[in-house]
Amino acid sequence: MYIFSKFILKLFKPLSLMFKPTTIKDIAKALNLSTSTVSRALRGGYEISEETKKIVLDYAEKVNFKRNPIALSLKERRSYSIGVIVCEVANQFFSQAIDGIESVAYSKGYHVIISQTHDSYDREVINVEHLANRSIDGLLVSLSAETKDYSHLEKLHEQGLPIVFFDRVLNSMNTHKVSSNNVKGAFEATEFLIKKGCKRIAHLANASQLSITAERQKGYEEALKKHNIPVDDKLIKYCKHGGRDKMEVEIAVREFIDHDPPDAIFVASDRLSTGCLSTLKKYATNSNILVAGFSNSELVELLNPSLSYIRQPAFEMGKKATEMLINIIESKYPIEEFESIMLDTTLHPNGA
Amino acid sequence: MYIFSKFILKLFKPLSLMFKPTTIKDIAKALNLSTSTVSRALRGGYEISEETKKIVLDYAEKVNFKRNPIALSLKERRSYSIGVIVCEVANQFFSQAIDGIESVAYSKGYHVIISQTHDSYDREVINVEHLANRSIDGLLVSLSAETKDYSHLEKLHEQGLPIVFFDRVLNSMNTHKVSSNNVKGAFEATEFLIKKGCKRIAHLANASQLSITAERQKGYEEALKKHNIPVDDKLIKYCKHGGRDKMEVEIAVREFIDHDPPDAIFVASDRLSTGCLSTLKKYATNSNILVAGFSNSELVELLNPSLSYIRQPAFEMGKKATEMLINIIESKYPIEEFESIMLDTTLHPNGA
DNA sequence: AAAAACTACGCAATCGATGCCGGCATCGAT
DNA sequence: ATCGATGCCGGCATCGATTGCGTAGTTTTT
């Protein structure tokens, strides 16, 4: 009866557990050595004779031995993986940044775990907790548009988890940050519109608590001031869900165009830019409103209405942020001085 | 000297290791219980008195105890995470599929690890190995355009790793598959072009070894045959890197348009569609060539030249595939019968 | 009242790999 | 010949959590 029930138990475990890869013990047994000897031979320990090393290495090769990273993580108390929090991978800016992140991470032996918030605060909290539980060694964060409470991140930071922000940074946290020069980028775009002859330039902005929102608005206002155009609050609208809700963009743009329309709109981010164009196409087909906005989409050149766009060096930003993060992770002494890196954007004029 | 060296060693370990979360042992010690009791109390074992359970639970709550998933993975020999192989997340089809994958995975307690091949065979091999080493419980695969040798996947499959294909499936492998009805989708798109009055319809196809390529070509040819239009091999071009190399698309399209241009092009996938439009815009601005193609981009409506598009139910496909994969993973008996699910596409006419 | 059963918990092995010790040869030096 | 120094390797504990088995102490059964 006992044996029978054990048999049943085995049968009722998920099948995937039945495949058992070769372990260091198997090798030790097969070669009549101790596990410690095998372990040291495998990592080339100097205390093992060349002869034994060769035997072990050859055998390991033969049976296609792979050391178990889970066991290693447990022992070393680190997982060699870093978490990435972004609003969505479908956004070209973030997918390019992720490419940059991966390029550095893989080359340094780290794995990348991506988590999407879809600009929702709740999902950000859940995902951050989830990642923290999965024993990541560090976190790369671009805040969600909705996030106003940062305690989920601050708690982890206090506990010693290395965190680096990129793009949408949290200025109040004392850690590395990577962003683009949003003030300058916004300034250039706005000035471009001014030089095109526009006088009434609206600004479609992201959620007001985001770092990028304030910076881009600052560039926008500085350009207006430089050219003696008054800043009109009625020409500035925020999208507090970052465009996650399609309607909020449409509503904001329609408020611009329905009464006393502007002759140009400066848009603060990717999804807003395309949402803005959609709305214009729908409700103001022949309006000749110029649009300039932040976008890293590869399709911009094909868009109609056309979009002059500010491109951020997303790949570079991802690389930089990851390098900094891995620096913290592997640092041997506490880091006191944190950097804030800023990379330049490029303006691509377009359209009539 | 010994103590000193130990001190140095500690100093030279990465700082991140110095943060030590509460373990079950800490709780046991604090409460003067054994670890087994704590463990069982935490998971509500029936052999622990209600009184003790409450004490343990309360204390665990108080010190914010989280069980270590790494330790669990080691013990249980599973990681509750599934790997996803796609060509790139920037592609809307895949990012939507990933949303579907995540929705199912998270709800069932699995983590999702995404890996991009960028349609390169080499990266596919590396990433698959990498994921396999990270002890994933199962793999969701959409093949890279370049892949012709499948041994890296077949090896894992033989070893018992659950694998489910979606979109770009490997027909020769006996496992679950999810795809859209590519034949029908291509047929409808081609017939739509025919009904628009087009007679010479070119076909810009993906790498010839991909499952989707053959299927979509079949639909294309069936539509032509139904309407008594001869299939012309010169009007069919393959992009063997799936458009990863931008030039290959441009070259293919230019061969179509430079001599005896067609009056329409049916394009087999997302990146090819946009690449095709770019080329047309660049070299055949006023050609009036109609384009219909597979695309899940949300920007299609804004494109110029315009694109009639076939949309795949990406989110649904991701969901289905993940459900099937988790079924295999958690199955208690060997699975003999594998399903191939096919979901319908929708055609969205556009343009003049 | 003796036996059986049950409650509530502890001990120790386990998962895979590592690393500190300690031990046994062998060799050279005194 | 004896001692110390190596070279080479095995034993054992460890990382965090789970679990089969054993066992006090109490309750129920006969």
Image (spheres, coloured by chain):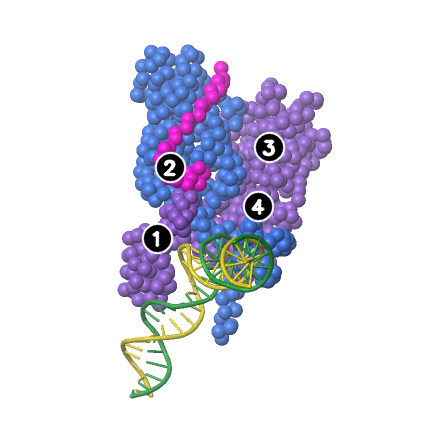
Chain colours: A purple, B blue, C yellow, D green
What residue is shown with label 1?
A: A22
Number of the front mark, 3 or 2: 2
Q: Name the residue tied to disc 3.
A: A244
On the same chain, marks 3 and 2? The answer is no
**Alpha carbon distance from label 4 to label 1:** 34 Å
Q: Could you tell me how far apart the alpha carbons at marks 1 and 3 are, in whole angstroms?
A: 48 Å
B11 and A127: which is toward the camera: A127
Q: Position of residue B234 (x, y in %)?
A: 31, 21
Does the magenta portion include B172? no
User: Which is closer to the viewer, label 2 or label 4?
Assistant: 2
- Measured in 3D between alpha carbons, the distance from the residue under mark 1 to the one under mark 2, in whole angstroms, is 24 Å
* Number of numbered discs: 4
Mark 4 Cα-neighbour bin, 10 Å: few <14, some 14–19, many ≥20: many
Q: Secondary structure at mark 1?
A: loop
Compared with A159, B203 (above or below) is above
Q: Amino acid at mark 3?
A: Arg
On the image, numbered disc 4 is attached to which residue? A128
Q: CA distance from mark 3 to mark 2?
A: 41 Å
Q: Label 2: which residue?
A: B335
Q: Magenta stretch? A: B326-352
Q: Are marks 1 and 2 on the same chain?
A: no
Identify the image quadrant of the C terminus of chain A: top right
